[in-house]
Image: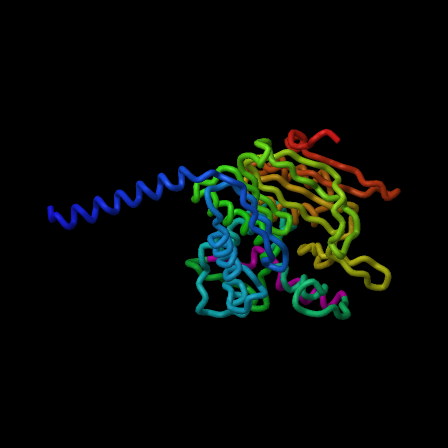
Amino acid sequence: MNTAFRLTRFSLFVLIVLSTMSCRNQQKQFFINEGLVYGTYYRITYEHYQDIEVDIKEAMAKVGTSLSTFDSLSVISRINRNDSTVVADTYFTEVFTTAQQVSTHTGGAFDITVAPLVNAWGFGFDPQHERTAILIDSIKQWVGYNTISLQNGKILKQHPQTQLDASAIAKGYACDVVAQVLREAGIENFLVDIGGELVVKGHNKRNTDWQVGINKAIDDATQQNQEIQQIISVTDVAIATSGNYRQFYYENNKKIAHTIDPRTGYPTNHSLLSTTVIAPTCMLADAYATAFMVMGNWEEIMKVVNNAVPPIAVFCIFEDTTGKHIEMASPNFEQYLQEK
C-alpha cells in the first residue's frame, strides 16, 4: 500500500476520533429553537451537545417547498395548476398516501381535495363572498378523495378543477420530519412543536415525561387565550389538536367555522368544540383530529378509534345545551391525563 495513502487514512482516522472525543467531552444541554414557519410558530426543544437549528430550518423548508399552497412553486401548487411536468417528491407522496388511508378509514370525513370548498367559504385564497346552494353543489363535484390517485409520481384527476389542500396534515408531517432529523443526530430527549402539533421523545429538563396542556375551547379568534383544560403527561408519541374556536367568522349573525365537511360542502355545525389525538406519528394525529372535528359524533369517532391501525387515542370537548363543556376520552387516552 502506498505510504502517503496510509498516512492520509491514518490522519482521517485521528480526526474522526478527536472529533468524537470532543463531542463526548462537551456537556449536553437543552436548546430551544423558535420562530415562525407556515404562517404559525415553531418551538423545538432538545438535549444535545450543540445547536442544530440550521438542520431543523432546512428540514422545515423542504416540507414547505413540497406542501405549501402559499408557495407557487411547491409541488402541491403545481399539481393544483395541473402542471404536467411536476413529479411528486417523497414528502408529497408520504402525505398523500397517509391522507388517502385516513380518508378511507373515516368515510371521507378527512379529504385532501377539500381545497375548492375551503376557498369558497373564505378560509383559503379567495375573499369571503356570497354563496348559494347551487354554487356549493357545483363546487362539490370537484371534491372527493376517490376521484384522484397517485401513479408513478403523477397525480391523476377525474376533474381538472380538483385542488388539494394539505394544511390539515402538513404541520403534523413537518413535526415528524423535524423529529427524524433530531433522532438521526442521536438526540434522545426532545419536544417538537409546530403550531400546536407535537412530537415528544424521552424526557424533559426535569427528567420526567413531557407535560402538555390542552387549551380550553373558548372562542378566541386572536389566539391569545392560553387557559388550560387538561394537562397530559407523554413521551414517545405525537399529539395534534383541532378545534373550531380559533378560526371562524360571523355572517348574518351566524358563526362560520373553518372546519368544512367535504361530504356535505358546508361548515360543521355540531357540539364538538375540540379534539386532541395521540398517535405514533403527528401526520396521523393531525389528520384524525381534523376528521373527528368533521364527524362531531362521539359514537362515530369511537368506531374509528377502535378500528384504527396503528392505534390512536382521542380526547374531545363537547358543549351541551346549557353551554357547559363536557370532556370525553377514549379508554387508552386516560393513562395520559394528570389529576387536576
The one of 13 and 169 positioned closer to us in this rendering? 13
Where is residue 252 drawn, in percent x and y? 85, 64
Tell me if 13 is positioned left or right of 238 in this view.
left
Tell me if 89 is positioned left or right of 317 in this view.
left
Please identify the quarter of the rendering in which residue 209 is found: top right
Is residue 74 in view from this perspective? yes
Residue ID at (47%, 46%): 50
Residue ID at (72%, 37%): 230
Please identify the quarter of the rendering in which residue 310 is found: top right
The one of 112 and 49 positioned closer to us in this rendering? 49
Tell me if 295 is positioned left or right of 164 in this view.
right
Is residue 312 inside the magenta stretch? no
Please identify the quarter of the rendering in which residue 306 is found: top right
Instruction: Find the magenta span and give its range.
Output: 133-150
Tell me if 226 is positioned left or right of 70 in this view.
right
Where is residue 59 drawn, in percent x and y? 48, 54
